Amino acid sequence: MSKSLSVIKKIGAKFNFILMPVAVLLLLMGINIIADIIRLGLPNALNFFIIEFRLNNLGNRVLGGNPISILNLASELAVISIGMTLVTAASRGQDIGVGAVAAIGASVFVYVIRLSQEVTLLWVLFAFVASIAACMLCGVFNGILVAKFKIQPMIATLIMFTSGRSIAYAINGGASPKVFDDITLQLGGFIHGVPVPTPIFIVLLYGLIFFLIFKFTNLRLYVQSVGINEKSAYLNGINPTTIKILTFVIIGFCVAGAGVINSCRMQRVDHLAILGGIEMDAILAVAIGGNLLSGGKFSIIGSVIGAYTIETLNVTLLRLGVLPEPIRVYKATFIILLMVLSSPVIKSFISQMWSNLTVKHGSVIKEEG
């Protein structure tokens, strides 16, 4: 029995970061199952999980259902949460300007797209690179304020939060341009002949890029070292200023992807509405993912699961009949409860209870032996 407890502790330590988002996901799924049993009866208990082929607006057979909708609609948040995790880990603060910078990136993307008479795949890729460059420049600006001038991240990024959408509006001459070409339509929807939404593949691409970066570079080690103890990292040959600026550049890369996904999905750039409120959702995704908002060790997987958890919460509230207007109140209440339950005080209490239980159980086993 003691060996079993030891194994459980080791597994818990290894997967500590993802325990919370997975637990919340399971809770939300359980709520949906119970709700479907109450509303529709026992045979329909698993309605929430049904995935089926449907015809979209173009008459193509595509996959539909709540799981597909969650994976699709959370794509922008999932991509941004990757960058937010790194910024949080290194700078011990958060970037609250991601929505505004995404608007800038989307505006640049659409502006470049509209320069061409004929939109080709190569031209779309060029527009995407231009969008990435614009968002990375915004990241450099924020990073310098944080790393060089020692301004608290939320205050430093407040500049972009305040002015970013106005800059995005000015890029397109004070207009909200639309795009109607087939390639961007496929990027925001479905590739012809592929039943899975394209944004899901873009998230997978971002995941693969960062998997390779962490595998073949020391970025994870450097970011965590700076976040845990900046002075010690410096004494060990790591430049905290460079690492912090780099994380803000990386979040610019992620934000550009989210902006392009959204503009392709909507087939336009609405500077005021694009990814509204995503800043807070990204921070919550990081927190729900088991990451400390005070920096240090981090889990990208945990944050991405946290992003899908937030979208699952949105879908669950809508399925329970909550209107879109007050949904943020219910969502905030749920998240407050979640944060309280995961606070150090509650964690310490549970840990103490578990420790007392295992000690007593171990002593009983010894006495019986």
Image (tube, grey):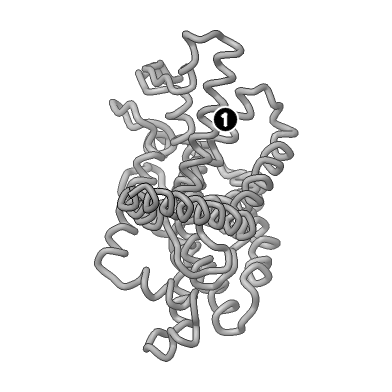
Residue at image point 60% right, 34% down: 314
Residue 343 percent coordinates (x, y): 62, 56
Q: Which residue is mark 1?
A: 315
Q: Is residue 175 visible?
A: no
Residue at image point 49% right, 22% down: 48
Residue 253 percent coordinates (x, y): 44, 60
* Side of 93 relative to 130 (left or right): right
Count up the numbered dots.
1
Secondary structure beneath dot 1 equals helix
* Side of 21 relative to 215 (left or right): right
Residue at image point 45% right, 56% down: 82
For residue 129, which quarter of the picture? bottom left
Along the line of sight, which residue is nearer the eye, 104 or 350? 350
Residue at image point 46% right, 78% down: 226
Which amino acid type corresponds to the residue marked 1 in the rendered image?
Val
Residue 89 percent coordinates (x, y): 49, 68
For residue 95, which quarter of the picture? bottom right
* Side of 172 relative to 242 (left or right): right
Residue sitting at the far left: 216
Along the line of sight, which residue is nearer the eye, 204 or 181? 204
Along the line of sight, which residue is nearer the eye, 277 or 288? 288
Q: Residues within 10 Å of mark 1 (few under 14, many from 20)?
A: some
